[in-house]
Image (tube, rainbow, N blue to C red):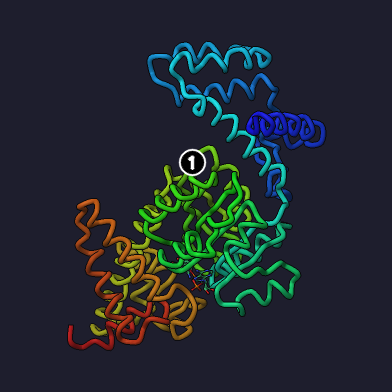
Amino acid sequence: MASSLRFRGAASGLRYWSRRQRPAAASLAAGKDLAPSSPVPPPAARFSRLTSEEIFSRAALRLGRCLKPNILAGVKAWRLLPLPLAPLVLPSLPLLGIQMDDVQRPFRDLGRVCSRSMASKTPVGFIGLGNMGNPMAKNLMKHGYPLIIYDVFPDACKEFQDAGEQVVSSPADVAEKADRIITMLPTSINAIEAYSGANGILKKVKKGSLLIDSSTIDPAISKELAKEAEKMGAVFMDAPVSGGVGAARSGNLTFMVGGVEDEFAAAQELLGCMGSNVVYCGAVGTGQAAKICNNMLLAISMIGTAETMNLGIRLGLDPKLLAKILNMSSGRCWSSDSYNPVPGVMDGVPSANNYQGGFGTTLMAKDLGLAQDSATSTKSPILLGSQAHQIYRMMCAKGYSKKDFSSVFQFLREEETF
Ligand code: NAD
């Protein structure tokens, strides 16, 4: 009954938006993006051009995916049924050996997504206002989203409170007040605490809530959190980011998103306010997988660049000249041409600022640990990745933990014993 009410509510929402949002709907129908001046799609615009027959047809199509293969042909025929016949057909499904839950789920999901999208500028929860979370949350504010804020470190919330955003005292309180929540936390342990802890999100999460974790954590933990969220009727997606604090400030992050594909558009609406690329990777955990692979390659290429530059300098080459030659040759990579680790070679990078800011050595060591765990569980050889992990761990032990990860150049220079 509840699900059918939600479905009817969604359908009336469609009519409302089809009157109010015709231009946006028309450009979407024509396959065009919305104008750059309105980067956030109008609420429910993506539903506005659906007739009730199309809604039923889509729901039936999704329903078909849930059913046993030997009755799929029959299900395809239902798609042709007009909406008024649905109440007659649906009750007879159990006789065909089809679970009613399989039938109801598509309608439930559709209603849930519609109601979230229609409430487009309702408050968004944000947990973890550190180096990355702070500018990301500010970009949501710029796009007009009121925020419900929490961080274990109260000072991190202060400037948001001063700006009029609502600060609460636990992740559970965030979940009580917002049905879309973004988390940006340092490690897997912090994410477990924020979601499943005594005052975690899942203690008070509302049914149908969308939970997006942008922290870089173990993909296995993302999958576990998704299962726990599902038990509470919520949807969890992993959406770790590439791009550092600068990209977070300018709203140019790349998000790698894992989770239920049908929820991707809802996640994209928020993530698009904070990033220029929002990429769907597959099932939950695949966003983390993509992120971990990228960072392992980044660590290896940074160490390679640092070693190369150090060797060249000791052979008497001018570092700027060497960087120039590398960057016009086959050794070029992001670490050499955009984030060179040698002081004096480039402006505006951490090496030009005593390795302050940027992406911390501790975080890189953590990501390499995640790569190591994933390699062990998938029996993948990561010879250079493991070596990079050891180097970054050693750096943490030798006082580099708070410096940017490109400080590996300084570390190698000072280590005469290698
Ligand atoms: P950070 O340490 O600066 O910020 C994390 C924030 O989370 C802090 O304010 C901390 O107080 C808060 N926090 C910790 N545990 C909490 C909890 N249980 N509940 C509520 N708040 C909690 O870290 P960051 O640099 O913002 O990085 C966040 C994530 O983004 C990490 O997983 C990191 O690997 C990833 N990342 C960072 C960068 C970067 O350049 N810094 C780039 C890409 C990805």
Which image quadrant: the N terminus? Answer: top right
Residue indicated by mark 1 = 260
Residue drawn at x 64%, y 57% is 176
Residue 402, relative to residue 179: is it above or below?
below
In this rendering, position of residue 320 left or right of residue 303: right
Q: Is mark 1 within 8 Å of ligand 1?
A: no
Task: Pick the residue in front: 340 or 51.
Answer: 51
Residue drawn at x 62%, y 61% is 174
Q: Most extreme residue toward the right, as rendered?
A: 19
Residue 265, relative to residue 204: is it above or below?
above
Residue 209 x %, y %: 59, 48
Is residue 268 visible in the rendered structure shown here?
no
Amino acid at pointer 1: Val
Residue drawn at x 62%, y 21% is 56
> Image quadrant of residue 42?
top right
Residue 99 x %, y %: 47, 24
> Image quadrant of residue 304?
bottom left
